[in-house]
Amino acid sequence: MEHEFRIAVVCSSNQNRSMEAHSFLSKKGFCVKSFGTGNMVKLPGPAPDKPNIYDFSITYDAMYRDLMQKDYELYTQNGILHMLDRNRRIKPNPERFQSSKEKFDLIVTCEERVYDQVLEDFESREKNDEQAVHIINIDIQDNHEEATIGAFMICELVTMLFASEDLDNEIDEILQEFEHKVNRPVLHTVQFY
């Protein structure tokens, strides 16, 4: 490919799954960004019905300090502080996909609802139909262990796609092979910028 292969990884809050994959892919030398599609950033709280909710403009560092102050024990034990510490080393704050004007060659979403939100966003954008983008979904549960497994799977998929001589013609075969290998359903569509 004559231009840099630009990748976006998208989950709901740009915290766990997309950031784990972002970290993994950037360490492998890929040009990657990560995003969330939610209206707000949600992190687990002291109870399932009491999440910590933040605006996308808040920094990972501010979330880290806020939760440390609220309940250091709880957020250390459930891994949230560790996750935020990793996130703040990657970039300053979570980013909302719908606010980004950047163009990518590949967008990988981590759950079907997020995939649908990305497609919805493309429907509402003005298009020049100049550049194709492959949008692929792999369902990854939102917990630390699955995020790590998901990052490995996303990295493997990106590596397979990146190695292709003719991605537009080979992508269906690559996705079938990948789907069979990881034993998870994969959704795929092409949109244009």
Image (cartoon, rainbow, N blue to C red):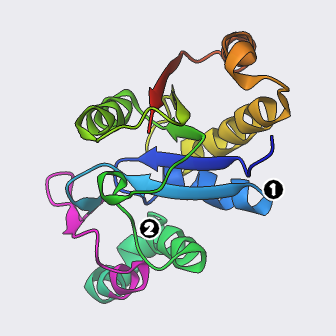
Q: Is residue 143 visible?
A: no
- Residue 80 — which label? 2
Task: Tell me which segment is drawn in magenta.
Answer: 43-65
Residue 165 in the image: x percent, y percent? 85, 26
Asked if 106 appears above or below 39 in the picture, the reply is above
Q: Amino acid at mark 1?
A: Lys
Q: In the image shown, does 22 or 134 lie closer to the viewer?
A: 134
Q: Which residue is mark 1?
A: 28
In percent of width and height, residue 95 lies at 38, 64
* Residue 40, visible in the rendered structure: yes
Q: Are marks 1 and 2 in contact (CB under 8 Å)?
A: no
Q: Secondary structure at mark 1?
A: loop
Neighbor class of circle 1 (other Cα within 10 Å; few <14, some 14-19, many 20+) is few
What's the residue at 75%, 12% (across, down)? 177
Quarter of the figure that contains the N terminus: top right
Instruction: Please check the rendered image and state whether residue 74 is part of the magenta-colored stretch, yes or no.
Output: no
Q: Is residue 15 left or right of residue 39?
A: right
Quadrant of the rendered image containing residue 128: top left
* Marker count (numbered): 2
Image position of 64 (left or right of 71): right
Which corner quadrant of the image does residue 75 belong to? bottom left
Give me the C-alpha separation between circle 1 and circle 2: 25 Å
From the image, state whether disc 1 or disc 2 is nearer to you: 1
| Residue depicted at 30% across the width and 59% down the height | 99
Considering the numbered disc 2 on the image, is that residue within a helix, a strand or a loop?
helix
Q: Is residue 53 left or right of residue 75?
A: left
**Residue type marked 2:** Ile
- Vertical placement of 53 versus 166: above or below? below
Whichever of callouts 1 and 2 sits on the residue coming sooner in the sequence is: 1
Is residue 51 one of those drawn in magenta? yes
